[in-house]
Amino acid sequence: MSRRLVNVTLDNLGDLPVRCRSCVFWELDPVAGERACDSGAADLEKEAWLSDTLLEWGSCGQLIYVDGLAAGHVLYAPPAYVPRALAFPTSPVSPDAVLLMTARLRPEFTGAGLGRMLVQGVARDAARRGIKAIEAFGSARPAVEPQPPAEWAAPPRNAPAQPAEHSCVLPAEYLLAVGFKTVRPHPKTPRLRLDLKSTVSWKEDVEYALERLLSSMQAPVLTPR
């Protein structure tokens, strides 16, 4: 089984999950995001955001392929490129950190160590740029299993064009399980941080946490509404 980690670009944007290809939850502020979804222009706004971010800042996402099939992805960027970040009560993101926006794994690939590879890819890229930390807004909604969303299927019939907030925000339990620490508590959306100064020990801790976490994860079953 071959695994390949590549940067997200305009050429492979179509390999993201169906929902994520036209989701602008993070890329636009709440008002602009709702307007884009209502007008059916969300996919174009997504492409425009990716294009601008790539030109001005560089790589802002990682895709992982298994035997040629897109199995998961992660998106991240400096907070200045993420308008939605300002809408959170626990903002702003620290100026020395990059914001981990969201991540997805195909259900059939959970427990295979792919989440570990994606997180490590973000850490390597951030460290190479001299960034000191990764921060994320977490969803404090209770969950049976602390896990990243695993969703690659087409949206259910009559589902809203813009996903609900909790589907675009990583579970706080998951972030804590892979080494993040809470820096701004909140009952719904705490802000968490992962310092990169101790890269070696961090990699070992994350490898262990993710291996244990993903090996016990069960993929959720999507049912039409």
Image: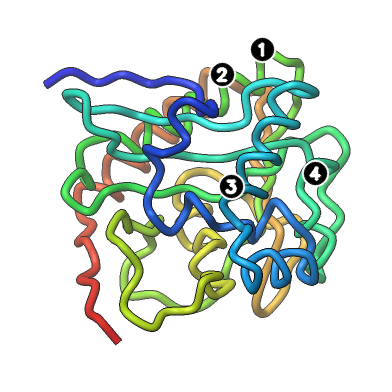
- How many marks the image carries: the answer is 4
Give the Cα distance between marks 4 and 1.
Answer: 18 Å
Mark found first going from the N terminus, 4 or 2:
4
* Disc 3 packing (10 Å; few <14; some 14–19; many ≥20): many
Taking the image as shown, residue 184 lies to the left or right of residue 153, namely: right
- Badge 3 marks a residue whose secondary structure is loop
Q: Which residue is pictured at 79% across the width and 41% down the height?
A: 81
2 or 3: mark nearer the eye: 2
Q: Name the residue under label 4.
A: 79
- Badge 2 marks a residue whose secondary structure is helix
4 or 1: mark nearer the eye: 4
Q: Quadrant of the N terminus?
A: top left
Q: In which quarter of the image is the C terminus?
A: bottom left
- Badge 1 marks a residue whose secondary structure is helix
Q: Where is residue 54 shown, x and y percent of the image?
A: 69, 25
Q: Which amino acid does label 3 sit on?
A: Phe
In this orientation, which residue lies closer to the viewer: 174 or 200? 174
* Disc 2 packing (10 Å; few <14; some 14–19; many ≥20): some
Mark found first going from the N terminus, 4 or 1:
4
Taking the image as shown, residue 152 lies to the left or right of residue 219, namely: right
In this orientation, which residue lies closer to the viewer: 174 or 70? 70
